[in-house]
Image (cartoon, helix red, strand yellow):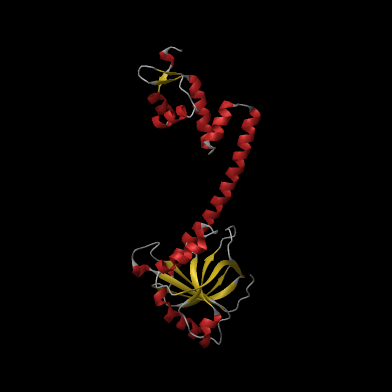
Amino acid sequence: MQSKKDLYQIGEVARLFHLSISLLRHYDKTGLVTPEYTDPDTGYRYYSLRQFECLNTIRYLRALDMPLEEIADFLHNRDTGRIQELLSKQLVQVHKKQQELAVIEHQIKNRLNQIQGALSAHPGEIFLEKKAPLKLACMKKQLNPENYLDLEYSIREMEQGNSPASIFLGKVGVGLFYESLKAHRFKPYDFVFIILEEDDPIKGQVIHIPEITWAVIRFHGSHEQAPGFYEKLLSYFKDEGLAPESFALEMTLIDYGLTHDQSQFITEIQIPFAICLES
């Protein structure tokens, strides 16, 4: 055994490597890093510089998010070819995470723009907006929600196989088909939808909507206040000599997911002038 002056107690090692004592004990128990010496009388663990080198390797590889099982395998079977293989494998995972984070960044920016647009809108005013192409995952289902809670079960059904971020980031809504609009029948709704991002996994019927101009109205409140605003939109179409060519989409842009203040709730209805669907 080395002289105790060349050994370091577990508390000091934990401090030097910014690790918890319990984690060092776990490393010992699993055989990842075994102390140089354990006092048989006191049970105190002592580490030498040899273990420092192992802990440095573990810290480096953990910073690369490498699983402990793979780190243990490398420590017990060190080889330049093996470390190249492990690092190359981890590099693939890093690139994958970068792509995932880029998608999340895009979704967050979209949600921020949506919230800012909702807060800057003039409630009750109709405006025209050319929107970029949309991709919707749709489920035909008659719904009669009064608020977002009434959509929860349908949202969970839609969530199966789709990105949870799509659900959270304000891209779930309900819609009415042309026949319902024509008959001025605004309840129940005809379908529920999720606006998909480019890389979102797809489940169920998907509708591709090209870039097109929509008539849009936003109002304070949730789904229970919507019928009067559908009437206002349809009157606008009639006054302008137009007719809705397809379905209407309705989303709550701000609701309980963002605020408890119901006076801040904002819902949007949009109906296109003309549309070409491709599923």
Q: Residue at x 58, y 50 (%)?
A: 99
75 left or right of 34?
A: right
Q: Toward which corner of the image does residue 120 lie, by quadrant?
A: bottom left
Q: Toward which corner of the image does residue 218 lie, by quadrant?
A: bottom left
* Residue in front for this viewpoint, 180 or 154: 154
The image position of residue 76, as x and y in percent, is 57, 26
Assign the C terminus to one quadrant of the image. bottom right
* Residue in front for this viewpoint, 88 or 144: 144
Number of numbered markers: 0
78 left or right of 157?
A: right
Q: Residue at x 50, y 32 (%)?
A: 59
The image position of residue 184, as x and y in percent, is 48, 84
The image position of residue 239, as x and y in percent, is 51, 87
The image position of residue 219, as x and y in percent, is 41, 74
> Compared to 44, does 149 lie above or below?
below
Q: Toward which corner of the image does residue 140 lie, by quadrant?
A: bottom right
227 left or right of 137?
A: left
> Compared to 50, does 216 lie above or below?
below
* Residue in front for this viewpoint, 270 or 14: 14
* Residue in front for this viewpoint, 117 or 18: 18
Q: Residue at x 58, y 62 (%)?
A: 203
Furthest-right residue in view?
81
Q: Is residue 133 visible?
A: no
Q: Is residue 188 visible?
A: yes
